[in-house]
């Protein structure tokens, strides 16, 4: 099939491109390089440079007859979305509506969205399945909810079929080292731990050790980016074979604490990574763990590379260079 990856030069998009290329598909990358990196545009893909906010550029690219469009072109820093909501409203909401509208105009009826567990907010029960109430606690999560809502409307009003993939904590790197450029200014735990190991930052700040968890630090469901990438290919196959839409969680269904991540990173790197305990970060729930039963049932997807060891080893390999 012929697939356009909007945001295909970013951290997740690059891995998604690799997965589609491995499946023998034709891959186009549409990216404005605001956070994506040119060195991550994979050989064998066709590059279309542009922003989802630039209707002309987007329209010119979308007119190129795509079977499936994948939307990975969003900003994703939850903390920043609370201090700069305009940036997120503009890119994530306006940009996504541009994509949905222009796909409709060009009769592209198969759409895959990078969504997020941030749509759920503070968990009411665990593990979180797709029926869990949606009550995002940050503006970033709200932008994803708005895009999902619009996809649902365009599904019923314009026959647009979509697969919305609600990622839990994306982590890890391609184990064959094909992703060359690292994320700039990462804010997520594992890259921050790596930067602290390499002396790129003074230390890791652990946001609270007084949560009601075994070691007091926050627990998350980390899912390897190679597993996430595989789900996009399965989502695209689903859209090619079914005249329907689907929203699924993507997680490993295992909870790992901040301290477990730090300890494994110390073990793998052999470095006594400096850290200190600071106050809780606003909006951080104690524990988030996915149920991915639906993805297993409907996409035959399961996380195969998301063990603690593989998450940390592949990230360390990428950072160590
Ligand atoms: N965390 C931390 N220090 C950091 C970054 C994150 O202690 O510098 C913790 C955070 O409180 C949460 C977990 O690590 O419990 C994962 O945070 P991240 O920002 O990676 O993802 P989130 O779960 O917020 O989407």
Image: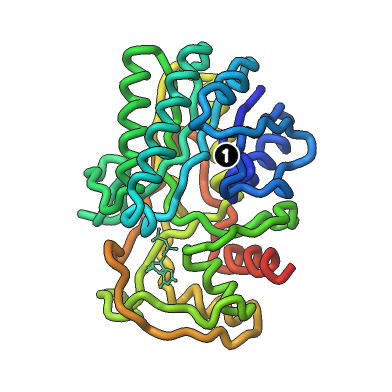
Residue 274 percent across, percent down from the top left: 52, 86
What is the count of numbered marks? 1
In which quadrant of the rendered image does the C terminus lie? bottom right
Question: Looking at the rendering, which quadrant does residue 65 occupy?
Answer: top right
Residue 90 percent across, percent down from the top left: 39, 38
Determine the residue positioned at 43% across, 73% down: 258
Q: Is residue 239 left or right of residue 14?
A: left
Question: Looking at the rendering, which quadrant does residue 61 occupy?
Answer: top right
Q: Residue furthest right?
A: 43
Question: Dot 1 surroundings within 10 Å: few (below 14), some, or many (20 or more)?
Answer: many
Q: Is residue 321 left or right of residue 62?
A: right
Determine the residue positioned at 36% across, 19% down: 154
Residue in the foreground of this view, choosing between 268 and 291: 268
Q: Secondary structure at mark 1?
A: loop
Q: What residue does disc 1 label?
A: 7
Determine the residue positioned at 54% across, 32% down: 70
Residue in the foreground of this view, choosing between 234 and 46: 46
Determine the residue positioned at 32% across, 38% down: 145
In which quadrant of the rendered image does the N terminus lie? top right
In the image, residue 263 sits, relative to residue 289, either above or below, namely below
Residue 224 percent across, percent down from the top left: 55, 55
């Amino acid at each position: 099939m012929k697939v356009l990856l909007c945001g295909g030069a970013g951290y997740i998009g690059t891995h998604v491109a690799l997965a589609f290329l491995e499946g023998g598909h034709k891959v186009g990358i549409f990216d404005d390089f605001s956070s994506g990196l040119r060195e991550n545009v994979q050989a064998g893909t066709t590059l279309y440079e542009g922003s989802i906010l630039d209707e002309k550029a987007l329209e010119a690219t979308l007119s190129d007859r795509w079977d499936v469009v994948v939307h990975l072109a969003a900003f994703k820093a939850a903390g920043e979305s609370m201090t700069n909501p305009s940036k997120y409203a503009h890119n994530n909401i306006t940009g996504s509506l541009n994509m949905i509208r222009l796909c409709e105009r060009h009769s592209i009826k198969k759409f895959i969205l990078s969504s997020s567990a941030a749509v759920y907010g503070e968990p009411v029960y665990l593990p979180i399945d797709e029926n869990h109430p949606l009550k995002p606690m940050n503006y970033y999560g709200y932008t994803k909810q708005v895009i999902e809502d619009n996809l649902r409307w365009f599904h019923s009003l314009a026959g647009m079929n979509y697969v919305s993939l609600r990622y839990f904590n994306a982590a890890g790197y391609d184990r064959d080292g094909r992703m060359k450029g690292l994320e700039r200014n990462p804010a997520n735990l594992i890259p921050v731990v790596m930067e602290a190991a390499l002396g790129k930052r003074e230390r890791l700040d652990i946001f609270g050790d007084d949560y009601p968890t075994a070691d007091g630090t926050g627990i998350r469901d980390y899912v390897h980016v190679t597993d996430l990438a595989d789900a996009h290919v399965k989502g695209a196959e689903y859209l090619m074979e079914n005249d329907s839409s689907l929203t699924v969680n993507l997680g490993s269904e295992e909870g790992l604490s901040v301290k477990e991540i730090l300890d494994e990173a110390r073990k793998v790197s052999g470095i006594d990574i400096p850290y200190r305990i600071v106050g809780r970060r606003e909006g951080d729930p104690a524990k988030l763990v996915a149920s991915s039963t639906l993805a297993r049932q409907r996409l035959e997807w399961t996380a195969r590379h998301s063990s603690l060891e593989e998450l940390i080893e592949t990230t360390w390999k990428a950072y160590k260079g």
